[in-house]
Amino acid sequence: MESQTDLLSIGEMARASGLTVSALRFYDGAGVLLPVRVDPGTGYRWYGPDQRAEARLLARLRRVGMPLADLRLVLAGWAGRDAALVCKLLDAHLLRLQDGLDDARRELSTVRDLLAQREHHMSDTPSTTGTTAPVRLTLPARALAAALDAVRFAVSTDPELPMLGGVCFDVDPEEQALRLVATDRYRLAHAQVPLGKGATAPATQVLVPAALVDAVRALLDAGDEGVLTIEPERVSLEAGGSQAGGPVLDHDFPDFRRLTRLSPGRRLSVDVPGLRAALATAEVRTSRRGQDSRDFDVAVLGISSDGVLTVASRDDHPAAHFAVNREFLLEALSVPARDQLVLELGGPVAPLAIRLPDGEHDFSLLMPVRLDDE
């Protein structure tokens, strides 16, 4: 029997194994990895030093998605030195993964075939959108600059996704506005500039590369107005006696209207400096799920009983929580340069919307992060 001084606290075991505290609690409740001692008064868990190896093994098997029932048997076989049982369970899970990969290949191949058929059908159908004539828009320089600043941070830098490597310029005659949209899959930013009373322009859409967006933005500090000319293969801006222009990207931007169509969520007004300070000092967890397999810090947001947005601790999070990439959230909070913003929280698996208090058209979305113990 280990003495109290030999035991590892649940936090120490989490750090030693790579499992979160919440995951250790879960595996205790599931009968997979039980602590050697539980404080009868506080319920606090303590683990023996020899359980570190089992916890590390559990963390590895967890990462490859082994089912809970098999996890229990693997750890039992490991403890009993039953190598044959452990190897059979590992082989069976590997076969499941291979079968699942084969199924995924077949399904994705079918989707590619359907996409090819759809593109062939669309190529035979005359286009009814856009225009071949140049579209000239006279826009307030300050408004256009603010809109570009509001979306530029969300442009993708992934060379494998060139269709996301710029800002979509979309002229919407119904809204009488120029919409600007950018996304890198994990976040999306949307802003719009009114065309002005009496202004008319046909519907048209082009994808402007990031370098040209930056060149256009640099001119907008030199004048009160800018003349934006959109052609099928080129975009240019005249402002302050100077001009910047260049070719557009030969890619179709995703249907951003579909991407921004969200179910209403709970809206909370937040003090931006206070939230930034809380995010900077709060404990965070590191994840590698989904975002190009790179490590990133996860911020877990919650709502207190009195309706105030909170930043949860590293190992504990409320039942109703919202986990996002912390760096992305901090960047999105800084773009509008406002001390008050509105966060719209639809649920743990819904995008987090960050909005201006006085408008619906300028906003950004952050995709949720799935926590390791969910």
Image (tube, rainbow, N blue to C red):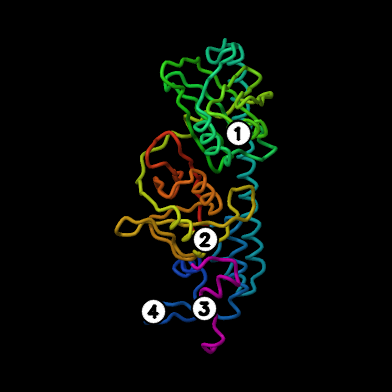
Q: Amino acid at mark 4?
A: Thr
Dot 4 alpha-carbon crowd within 10 angstroms: few under 14, some 14 to 19, many 20 or more: few
Which of label 1 and label 2 is nearer to you? 1
- Please give the residue where the numbered disc 2 appears in the rendered image: 280
What is the secondary structure assignment of the residue under circle 2?
Answer: helix
- Magenta segment boundaries in residue numbering: 1-21
- Please give the residue where the numbered disc 1 appears in the rendered image: 217
Quarter of the image for residue 166 reads top right
Q: Amino acid at mark 3?
A: Ser
Residues at marks 4 and 3, CA–CA distance in whole angstroms: 13 Å
Residues at marks 1 and 2, CA–CA distance in whole angstroms: 30 Å
Residues at marks 1 and 3, CA–CA distance in whole angstroms: 54 Å
What is the secondary structure assignment of the residue under circle 1?
Answer: helix
Q: Earlier in the sequence, mark 3 or mark 2?
A: 3
Q: Earlier in the sequence, mark 1 or mark 3?
A: 3
Residues at marks 4 and 1, CA–CA distance in whole angstroms: 58 Å
State the residue in front, 257 or 336: 336
Q: Return the mark for residue 9.
A: 3
x and y, in percent, of residue 175 in the image: 42, 23
Which of label 1 and label 3 is nearer to you? 1
